[in-house]
Image (cartoon, grey):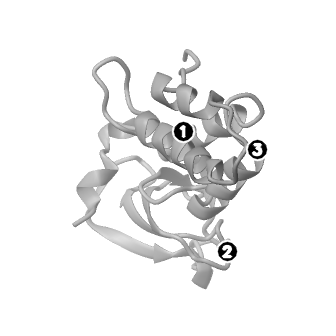
Amino acid sequence: MTEPRAPSVTIRAVTRRESSSSVWPGKMVAIVDCYDALTSERPYARPFSPYEALQHLYGWRHHLFHLELVEQFIQCLGIYPVGSLVELNSGEVAVVLAHNRVRRLKPRVLVILDPDKQPYSAPIPLDMLTAPKLANDQPYEIARALEHGMHGIDPREYYL
């Protein structure tokens, strides 16, 4: 996978030198704009998953963006942003529906594929904060984030 480039409009916004405190909103807008560009359909590149986009922003925090603002942005979205595709420790695949404000690693998810990666007839909502258990009495956990479109899933199909 090749390293994506931040959109040129974002780079121009970030590299402008201004001394007033009014620059802060512009710097945050640049981060949001870049995140949106990375996660959107574009004619020249595939969209990245929300998780992948955050990884890129984090990597650029020292040379393209304001370090603390990138970290605050990630705190707001959580490590698994809404719309992320994740694999659970059960092998099932889920879409992140909402965050739990207290425990960012325990979001509400919608389980859509079984461990064999076959779709459930009815997706299963799961609030990981309530510590649901697997058959072996182990708690459900997110094992890893999945790439955008993995298993042919478009997370947007699971939102109203």
- Position of 109 with respect to 57 (left or right) is left
Label disc, if present, on residue 103 of the rendered structure: 2
Amino acid type at circle 3 is Leu
| Residue occupying the point 68% across, 38% down | 18
| Residue occupying the point 63% across, 38% down | 57
**Furthest residue in direction bottom, as rendered:** 130
- Position of 76 with respect to 152 (left or right) is right
Structural distance between the alpha carbons of marks 2 and 3: 23 Å
Task: Using the rendered image of the protein, determine whether residue 146 is visible from the camera's viewpoint.
Answer: no
Label disc, if present, on residue 53 of the rendered structure: 1
Amino acid type at circle 2 is Arg
Per the image, the residue denoted by label 3 is 67
Structural distance between the alpha carbons of marks 3 and 1: 16 Å
Please tell me which residue lies in front, 65 or 140: 65
Label 2 or label 3, whichever comes before in sequence order: 3
99 over 37 or under it: above or below: below
Q: Residues within 10 Å of mark 2 (few under 14, many from 20)?
A: few
134 over 113 or under it: above or below: below
